[in-house]
Image (tube, helix red, strand yellow):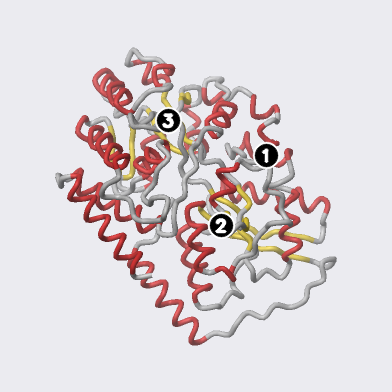
Amino acid sequence: MKRLSLAAAVLLVSSALLLAGCSKKNTAVAADPNGPITLTVWCWDPTFNVYAMNEAAKIYKASHPNVTVNVVETAWADLQQKLLTALSANQTSSLPDIVLMQDNAIQKNVTTYPKGFLPVNGKVDVSQFAQYKVDVATINGQSYGVPFDNGASGTFLRRDIVEQAGLQVSDFNDITWERFIELGKIVKQKTGVAMISAVGNENDIIALMMQSAGTWFFDAEGKVNIANNTVLKEAVKQYKAMVDAGIILLVTDWNAYIASLNNGSVASTINGCWIVGSISAEASQSGKWAVANTPKLNVPGGINYSSVGGSSWVVLANTKYPDVVMDLLNTTFAGSVPLYETILPSSGAISTWLPASKSATYGQPNAFFGGQKIYEDIVAYAGNVPQIKYGLFNYEARDAVSRALADIVGGTPVDTALATAQKNVEFLVAGQ
């Protein structure tokens, strides 16, 4: 997942003001629902999200031959910038009908631009999705997203490497982060391979740890909760312990992270289940992987389940065909078991639409993962993920904590770094 930096946000606002000064408002026109209709969708990842929407479009076209869906691959960071720039300038004619939106961006985007999006209530049945996914897109009682991919986390292990170290996959189930570090030291000592990898300037592992304990960077009242957050301090402690033990490989960017999984540089990754597609891309490792649940923090409320990422389909208010858009989403992502049976084996797109999880497809052994029924296991993990509220300033908080984490790894005391992060986020919140 990619996030906008403060500098990018300033540039975005400047661009919006420029557009506002030289453009005209979008003018909607009446549309013939029986005539040729082309819907445009922006989303990222050609083997996952783009593929899924194209498959949904095929299903819909079978019963609505006049409807064509044009899926435009757009990286998340670019999508978010183009979207906010257009909405800020009230210049929405260039926007698509549907966008895929990171779950942790929905609350702020919709709250900031309430006229830019359409609620799906009464048009799309969201009652059969996992409740934690519905909640992230609910604002003032209105649902603004149709949940798509599942972000339930797991420990994705190289079975061959851990067995070379004299361990078993089962040793990694239902453990604490302290035990994970102990096992990581054994793997590193016996095989010379790092236990895990992470992008050095991001904090996905910290966020994963926090959600597993049911907490976040803001308290229940929405106030910044960083400097005195005991769960965050414990998460930072475990992260620093992994760095000091030399069992975590810190890399520079996402591509290097994926390469570390595919080239055998690490024995595991702990991430959202959507990582299955990237892992499975390396065919030579077929049969060598396995999945266990997520380590837990040794704090009150800490459990072995969490979530990373996840996204939802969001309808733009500028669409000329709102009824068609809603019907498309309602009859495919919120209504088609065959859709999920198609995209699961090919892309690993695990549904949060509960009827799909009852399909026999989810119980099939996965050869790449040594015959383990990983989708059945991951769906079970998803049912235990704690619900949290990300807050309006989630990205700002995550950026601040990422900088604090880098400082802590570099030697800055934890309390000092987190106090600085708290002040920086409070400053940004006060300026809104």
Quadrant of the rendering where the C terminus is positioned: bottom left
Image spot of residue 51 (x, y percent): 62, 47
Q: Residue at image x 19%, y 33%?
A: 244
Q: Residue at image x 56%, y 29%?
A: 380
Residue 52 as seen in the image, left or right of residue 328: left
Q: Are marks 2 and 3 in contact (CB under 8 Å)?
A: no
In the image, residue 294 above or below residue 114: above
In the image, residue 206 above or below residue 158: below
Residue 61 as seen in the image, left or right of residue 369: right
Q: Which mark is residue 73?
A: 2
Image spot of residue 3 (x, y percent): 40, 57
Distance (Cα) linking label 1 and label 2: 20 Å
Q: Which residue is mark 1?
A: 340
Q: Which mark is residue 303?
A: 3
Q: Are marks 1 and 2 in contact (CB under 8 Å)?
A: no
Q: What amino acid type is highlighted by mark number 2? A: Glu
Which numbered mark, 1 or 2, is in the foreground of this view? 1
Q: What amino acid type is highlighted by mark number 3? A: Ile
| Disc 3: CA contacts within 10 A as few (<14), some (14-19) or many (>=20) | many
Dot 1 or dot 3, earlier in sequence = 3
